[in-house]
C-alpha cells in the first residue's frame, strides 16, 4: 500500500516525539555523559560511512521486529524473513536444469544439494509466471563478494518455474557464517558481547503477478546457531529437513542432499 505525503507527515508527527521522549528518558535515567554521547554520534557516523545501517538494524533485531509486524500471521502463506544486506541486484538468469554455482578451490568438501518445491497462491493455484531469486554462501569462504576464489554471482541466481509451478535448483549445503565484523557494527557486537554467527541458510525472493513478493530464508535442522542466530531470524516453519541420498541417484560420485520447500504467495491487497 503506498503512503501519501499527508499520511507520512501525520505518522512523523505522532512517532518522532515519542521516539525522542523514549531516547531522552534512557539518557537521563543513565546520566549519559557528554563524552559518551559524542562517542555514540561518532559511531553512528561510522555506520553511515560504512553503509552498515541495514546490518546494524539486523544485529539489533530491529529488522526481525519490523518483519514480524509487517506481514500477517497467515499460515496459508510461506513465512517471510528479513532480507539482510547481502543481496546483489541483477543476478544472472539460470536456465533449467538450474545450477547456481561453479565449483571453486575450497568447494571440494562441500555437499551438493537439490532444493525443490512448487510456487502456488495460498489457494493452491500454481503461479506459472513466478520468478525465484536465490542468494547464499558457498560451503567455504562465505558469500562470493567476500571470497576471491569464487566467480562473480556464485551461489546467486534467478529462474522460473515449470508447467505445474514446480522448481528445482542445484546448489551446495551452506555453512554457518559470521556477519561482517570488520566495521563499526563488528565493534558494536564486540562491545555488547554479542556473537556474530548466523545459522546456515538460503535466501529466497519470490515474485509473481497479483501476489505480495516474498522475501524469506530456509534453515536446516541441527545447526548450532538455530536457537542463537545473531539477527534472531530463525522461524520454525522455515527449518526444512535435508534428506541424504546416494550419489548414483543423480549420477554423482558422492552422496548429496535434497530439501523440499513449498512456496505459497499471498494475493495482493
Ligand atoms: C545474511 O544472512 O545475509 C545477513 C543478514 C543480516 C546481517 C548480515 C548478513
Ligand atoms: Fe545470508
Image (cartoon, grey):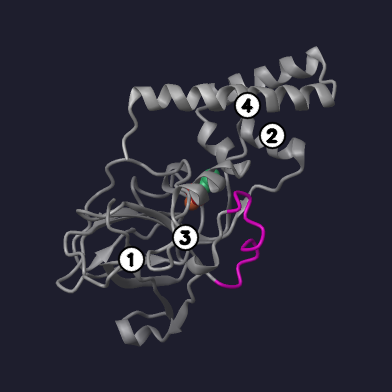
Question: Contact (CB < 8 A) between labels 4 and 2?
Answer: no
Q: Which mark is residue 73?
A: 3
Q: Is residue 233 magenta?
A: no
Q: Position of residue 256 (x, y in %)?
A: 42, 78
Q: Position of residue 98 (x, y in %)?
A: 25, 65
Q: Tell me if 261 is positioned left or right of 64 in this view.
A: left
Q: Quadrant of residue 255?
A: bottom left
Q: CA distance from mark 3 to mark 4?
A: 27 Å
The residue singled out by tag 4 in the image is 18
Q: Which mark is residue 264?
A: 1
Q: CA distance from mark 2 to mark 3?
A: 32 Å
Q: Position of residue 90 (x, y in %)?
A: 27, 42
Lower sequence index among marks 1 and 3: 3
Q: Label 3: state its secondary structure.
A: loop
Q: Label 2: state its secondary structure.
A: helix
The residue singled out by tag 2 in the image is 188
Q: Quadrant of residue 208?
A: bottom left
Q: Is residue 229 magenta?
A: yes
Q: Label 1: state its secondary structure.
A: strand
In front: label 2 or label 1: 1
Question: Contact (CB < 8 A) between labels 3 and 4?
Answer: no
Q: CA distance from mark 1 to mark 3?
A: 13 Å
Query: What span is in magenta?
Result: 221-232
Q: Position of residue 197 (x, y in %)?
A: 63, 52
Amino acid at each position: 500500500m503506498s503512503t501519501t505525503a499527508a499520511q507520512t507527515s501525520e505518522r512523523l508527527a505522532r512517532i518522532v516525539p515519542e521516539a525522542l521522549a523514549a531516547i531522552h528518558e534512557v539518557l537521563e535515567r543513565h546520566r549519559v555523559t557528554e563524552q559518551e554521547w559524542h562517542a555514540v554520534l561518532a559511531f553512528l557516523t561510522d555506520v553511515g560511512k560504512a553503509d552498515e545501517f541495514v546490518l546494524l538494524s539486523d544485529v539489533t533485531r530491529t529488522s526481525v521486529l519490523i518483519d514480524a509486524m509487517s506481514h500477517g500471521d497467515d499460515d496459508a502463506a510461506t513465512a517471510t524473513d528479513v532480507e539482510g544486506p547481502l543481496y546483489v541486484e541483477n543476478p544472472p538468469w539460470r536456465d533449467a536444469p538450474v545450477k547456481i554455482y561453479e565449483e571453486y578451490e575450497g568447494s571440494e568438501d562441500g555437499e551438493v544439494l537439490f532444493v525443490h518445491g512448487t510456487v502456488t497462491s495460498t489457494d493452491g493455484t500454481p503461479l506459472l509466471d513466478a520468478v525465484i531469486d536465490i542468494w547464499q554462501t558457498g560451503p567455504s569462504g562465505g558469500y562470493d563478494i567476500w571470497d576471491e576464489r569464487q566467480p562473480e554471482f556464485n551461489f546467486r541466481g534467478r529462474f522460473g518455474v515449470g508447467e505445474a509451478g514446480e522448481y528445482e535448483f542445484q546448489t551446495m549445503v551452506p555453512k554457518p557464517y559470521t556477519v561482517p565484523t570488520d566495521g563499526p557494527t563488528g565493534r558494536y557486537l564486540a562491545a555488547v558481547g554479542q556473537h556474530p554467527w548466523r545459522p546456515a541458510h538460503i535466501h529466497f525472493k519470490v515474485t509473481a503477478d497479483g501476489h505480495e513478493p516474498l522475501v524469506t530464508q530456509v534453515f536446516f535442522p541441527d545447526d548450532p546457531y538455530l536457537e542463537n542466530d545473531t539477527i534472531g531470524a530463525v522461524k520454525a516453519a522455515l527449518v526444512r529437513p535435508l534428506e541424504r541420498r546416494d550419489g548414483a541417484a543423480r549420477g554423482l560420485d558422492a552422496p548429496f542432499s535434497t530439501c523440499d520447500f513449498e512456496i505459497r504467495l499471498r494475493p495482493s491487497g
